[in-house]
Image: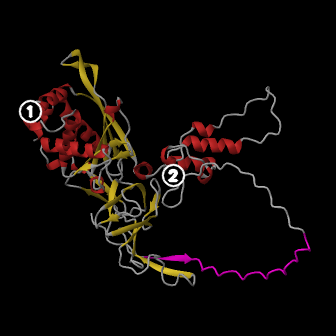
Amino acid sequence: MAIQKSAPAVDGVQSFRLPDVGEGLIEAELLSWYVKPGDEIKVNQMICEIETAKAVVELPSPFAGTVRELLAEEGQTVDVGAVIITVDDGTGGSASGADPGAEDGGDTEVREKPLVGYGEKAASTQRRARRRPAPSAPSSPPVPPSAAPPAPAPAVVAVPAAPAPASGPAGRPLAKPPVRKLAKDLGVDLGSVAPTGDGGIVTRDDVRAAAEAVRAPVQAEPQPESAPAAPADRSARERRIPVKGVRKHTAAAMVGSAFTAPHVTEFLQVDVTKTMKAVARLRARPDFADVRVSPLLLVAKALLMAVRRHPEINATWDGDNQEIVVKDYVNLGIAAATERGLVVPNVKDADAMTLPELAAGLKRLTDTARAGKTSPADMSGGTITITNVGVFGVDAGTPILNPGEAAILAFGQIRDMPWVHKGELKVRKVTTLSLSFDHRLVDGELGSKVLRDIGTALEDPELTALAWG
């Protein structure tokens, strides 16, 4: 991924602005820097890692030179278009990097290069007028030596200095983003905290100790022993998790989906004993040796067969044109829980794949999602989704639609349950399927037929594959 320069060089200093690596993103969290001031970098060398609302992405440098300044900290949320790093390319005659007209003060208009999803805009940059030296005050007339006796020199008392916090590249105390957040919540100035962590890093305990010292009243006399103890600070026993990145995007999307599309959810219990036997046989086949064969694979195949029989379930609602858009391809989404939140990558054209190809596609998506490396391309364009709640030991749920899709299937855990089989009560492998759909374009009849077909395919996957093709 090559990114073009976002601003012209000033005296040989290039300014790199945070680009929109998706479509219409407005911000990203800077996870980590790969470079530091003074490093020599090359064109397209990866300089940092960011997390957008859709994925974790590495950014390459669009120019070569010496890193001059990092203008964003790790853990900081940065707006798209903001300068995050400056690089001296060695072509300027001055290292100051000052813009023309900065000495006289006033406004300078800067044209930002359009990013994806944004038009060109003018940003007015306020520059402070240069300070003029203040005129020196007239000197007082000399005092004759006999007019006043010389004042004795004040006594100097040596006071041991507290260790000063170590500073980062921009003169800020060294502290991790959660520690900075704690200091902000407690009203503690990090610059006044003495660090005890390795390498001069301010720790959580340092911040809490500083907060307690500020809150402790100065007492002239010792308090009586019978005085009641002050209530413990609740903030020390609470954790605050910033809502950003993938989690922020997911929250907004789910709220939008829940209050835009009228959801209906139907449930079906299914005897999947034959499905589990089929999974065991597939695992022993040579053509499935390098892929992961799980019940989810056959659930996905059953959903694809149902979509082929009822293509109207694979659609979206076009509110602007008041149309239902039926899609003759299936980009199958798989909801995956990751450390950064819920992501839903999708297998492109899953309906055209063989079973081994589908298994390989599902494995690639889930492995990439768990590693936190899902690309924006894998996250976009989904048409219908499966969420596997069974892996968490849950029987069923009412899944919320992925925005823009007409249906989502929840697959519950497989349990041994009493079941009437061929007229006799036996212990069978049973699961519960939940299908949520958008009632604007999917009525009860269509939703019920789709759910019933999925259940039929799982009750006897081999016979269904022969019958439906």
Q: Nearer the viewer, residue 12 or 113?
A: 12
Q: Quadrant of the N terminus?
A: bottom left
Q: Residue at x 20, y 53 (%)?
A: 329
Magenta-drawn stretch contains 73: no
Label whose residue precedes the other's in the sequence (2 or 1): 2
For disc 1, the marked residue is 285
Tell me the crowding category of disc 2: few under 14, some 14 to 19, or many 20 or more residues within 10 angstroms, Cα based: many
Colour mode?
A: secondary structure
In the image shown, does 263 or 22 lie closer to the viewer?
Answer: 22
Tell me the amino acid under the disc marked 1: Arg
Q: Is residue 385 left or right of residue 134?
A: left
Task: Give coordinates of residue 284: x percent, y percent.
Answer: 10, 30
Q: Residue at x 56, y 46 (%)?
A: 195
Q: Residue furthest right?
A: 147
Q: What segment carries the magenta color?
A: 121-148
Label 2: element kind:
loop
Q: Which residue is mark 2?
A: 174
Residue drawn where x is 61% and y is 42% of the image: 208
Q: Position of residue 218 (x, y in %)?
A: 77, 42
* Residue 395 in the image, given as x and y percentages of width and height: 34, 29
